[in-house]
Structures are given as C-alpha cells and as structure tokens.
Image (cartoon, coloured by chain):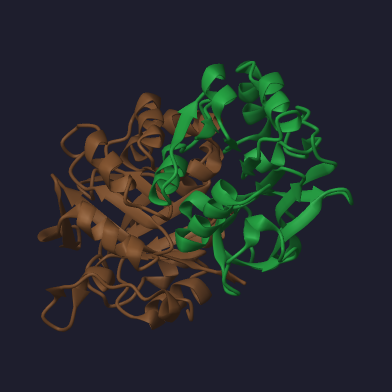
Amino acid sequence: MYRPRVIPCLLLRGHGLVKTRKFKDAVYVGDPVNAVRIFSEKEADELTLLDIDASREGRGPNFELIEEIAGECLMPIGYGGGISSFDQVRQLIRSGVEKVIINSAAALGSMAVISEAAAAFGSQAVVGAVDVRHRLLQGYKIAAKSGTQEIGSRLEDHVRALVDAGAGEIFVNNIDADGTMAGFDLGLVRRVADSVDVPVVACGGAGTLEHLSQAIHVGGASAVSAGSMFVFHGKHRAVLINYNPTELATI
Amino acid sequence: MIAIIDYDIGNLAAVSNMLRRIGHDSAITADPEVIKSADRIILPGNGHFDTCMKNFRATGLVPLIERRVFEDRVPLLGICVGAQMLGSGSEEGAEPGLGWFDMKVRRLPRSDGLRVPHMGWNRVGRAAPHHYIVQGLDEDARFYFVHSYYLDPGESVDVLLTVEYGITFAAGVSRGNVSGVQFHPEKSHRFGKQLLLNFAEGRG
C-alpha cells in the first residue's frame, strides 16, 4: 500500500535549528544533528532541511554540517539553501543528501542549476521550491531569498518552468501560513498541483492530522511537510520533537 | 568487505553509512584491487538509465565485476537503477543493459491520482519468502521508492518482492548470487537495515 509522505521541515540558522512564523520571529528549537537522530529513530518518512539565511546572505551551503546531519538520516533527506551552482549540487549529493532543493536561484532567473543537476543525477534528485504569499488585489506572489524579494512571474508559469527545466518534484511553502498551525491554504496547493504532473509537497500551516489529510485529498498534494507540528508540543509551544508514523499513516 | 561501485552517480555515502550501522565495512570504490578483494558487491544507480550505463561502462570495471560475480560467485546487489541495469535494457533509453538477467525495464503507466515518479514509502509483498535476501522482514515491511520505470523480469528470474502502484510489479529480483531491488534499502529505516544485513551475512 502506497502512503503519502509526511516530511518534517527543519530550518537551519547557523549551527542551530529554528522555527519561524510567517518567515519571521525565528525561535531556537535545538541541535540539528540531535533532532535528525530523533526523527530517524521515530522512522520519519523523509526530511527537508532548509538553511534560511544562505541565499539572503549570498553564501553557499555548510557542507560539513550537512554531511554530519545526513549521516544520521536513515531516510531520504533533501537540502535547500544557497544552492546556485552545479558544483554545489555535486558536493551536496556527495555529502549524503538525496535531493537538492532549488528556490532563489531559479526564482531570480537561472534555471541552469536545475537542468544541470537533473541531467547528472536525475529529476528525482531535484526539487523546485517556491515560497508564496497572498497579496490583496494582486493574488499569489512568489518571493525569493526567504521571502524578502518578490518576483513578477505568475505562480503557475513559474512552477511549470521549474518542471520543464528538470525538477522532479515541487515544494510549495506558504509564507502567510508558516508557523501558524492554522491549516494549509488549500486553494494554493490545488493551483500548484493542477499546474504540474510531478509530485507536489505542500508546506506551511499544518497543525493537525486533519490539515495534512486535507492537503492530500482536497489540495491534491502528493506529500505534506510541516515544521511546528513536529517540534512543538501543547499550547505554550514547548519544544518536543514528535512524529508518530502509525498515526500519520492514517491521513 | 563490501565494495560499493563508484561511477559518479547519486548518494553513495548513504549506502556505506547504513552498512556501518549494521557492523560491516564497505568501500565506495572504482579501484580494481579493492573490487578483487571484496566479498560482496553493491551496484548502486540513480537518475537516467543511459547515463548510468554509460558511466558504469566508462569505468572499465564491467569485465572484472562479471568475473567476480560469475566465476568467483561473489554476491552482488543492484539498487534502483543498479537493479534495472541487470536486464537487457530500459524503455527510458537506448543503451543496452548488462544483460545478466532476462529482464526488461518498462515505463510506469500513469493511472488515476497516481503521479509518476513513484516516490515514497510502499509496502511490499514477499513473493519468495524463503530467499535469504528477504528473511526476517515484517509483514508490514515498507521501503522507500523513487523511480519512473519498473522491473519486468522473464521466467528465468525469481521475483522476491512485489509492490503495487497502479500496477503490481517486481520490487526485488534474483538469480543465483545476483539480486536487485527497485527501492532504496539504504534509506528505508530498519526494513532496509534488515535487507542489507541479509545481503551482507546471508549465503547467496
């Protein structure tokens, strides 16, 4: 029986993990190597690791740390943040990640890193990511560099271009819903899922199993990703890494 | 020592990492001397079939590996495209496969609500429960798959495991000391650990 993937999304800031709200107000939630070890023990389906400062600061990935983190991962892991060249992609794959996640470089006009990576390692190793916010009267806007730089491309056109360049999967993150745990923007997920024929991973807003289920069954996503849900516990958002595969298999 | 054949494709660190966890030394290598002394061989593979075949042949290692497998009877495990390469060729490309198995590789049909690639966790059925590669796997064993083409073995090839994604197809195949799995045991938690342990310690 095939089951939709449920993917914890971990945000890297320096050598620590943080969780944001609406891409702001980062709160420290722990050590990444330790967190990944726990998710591994809990048999998480897959992990997404995003360095939220790399592109904004104009620097590349922290390969040493990524290699250490990937070494703890007995499930697939994708890395995103500051990837702009094929050499970086090669080094990331060598460091032990299955997937490279390309966001800002593609949003700001260069699809070359996607097509080169897909040609060498296959489309399954390349995820095209978009961060999206909704603007009154303007609709959905794509923003690069951790939400700080909006671009003009239409959402549907941009995700199709990512797939045409070679991305084997689309990761769509909703800036407005990030960290709110109030549910996905299902209209956004549906629009992306209807625009491409590769798997779509929905991220941004998950707080309950019901939310995850909606993203799959109403939004049309193939997989779901969440941060807060898997690192916080209870009303006061105490940090507690949790992931129950049996429960999550029911979505 | 287990030789993981390095021909510049995909995430090989994950394979050696998983082997280390089950207490087995491995080397990611294209060195003939290392392959000559290996007592097991893993043939990985990721990405496009033709790219894998071309890169693999370009290493010049194929005759040596064939000698080790067919004369010295060293067990070999193909993973993902590494398993597909055991057959005669793939609908994905034009390059001939290794031709060790009577096996074709075909494109997964698109079916209702199921996107291609088949990417994610899937439960497998045991078609040959007594084979050493599948010993000790739980009834609910699941593995991580990511592929757009599937193994279609002929009658001379044993099907070890099956999986369903729109259609039912072979997830694991074997003939003599050569086996192949379509999924990624190195990224499949305790299920993959068990399978790799069987390969590393069982008698092929």
Q: Nearer the viewer, residue B28 or A3?
A: B28
Instruction: Tell me the brown chain.
Output: A
Q: Is residue B71 left or right of residue A230?
A: right
Q: Where is residue A135, by image quadrant? A: bottom left
Q: Nearer the viewer, residue B170 or A115?
A: B170
Residue placed at 36% from the left, 72% from the top? A184
Q: Which x, y percent locates residue A251? A: 47, 79
Q: Nearer the viewer, residue B54 or B192?
A: B192
Q: How many marks?
A: 0
Residue placed at 41% from the left, 38% from the top? B13
Q: Which x, y percent locates residue A147? A: 23, 50
Q: Quadrant of the N terminus of chain A?
A: bottom right
Q: Which x, y percent locates residue A166? A: 53, 38
Q: Which x, y percent locates residue A45? A: 43, 63
Q: Is residue B173 left or right of residue A229?
A: right
Q: Is residue A149 left or right of residue A173?
A: left
Residue placed at 16% from the left, 57% from the top? A18
Q: Is residue B65 above or below residue B189?
A: above
Q: Is residue B203 above or below residue A21?
A: above
Q: Is residue A118 above or below residue A208?
A: above
For chain B, the rendered hue is: green
Q: Is residue B174 above or below residue A181?
A: above
Residue placed at 14% from the left, 76% from the top? A237
> Would residue A114 be visible to someone looking at this image?
yes
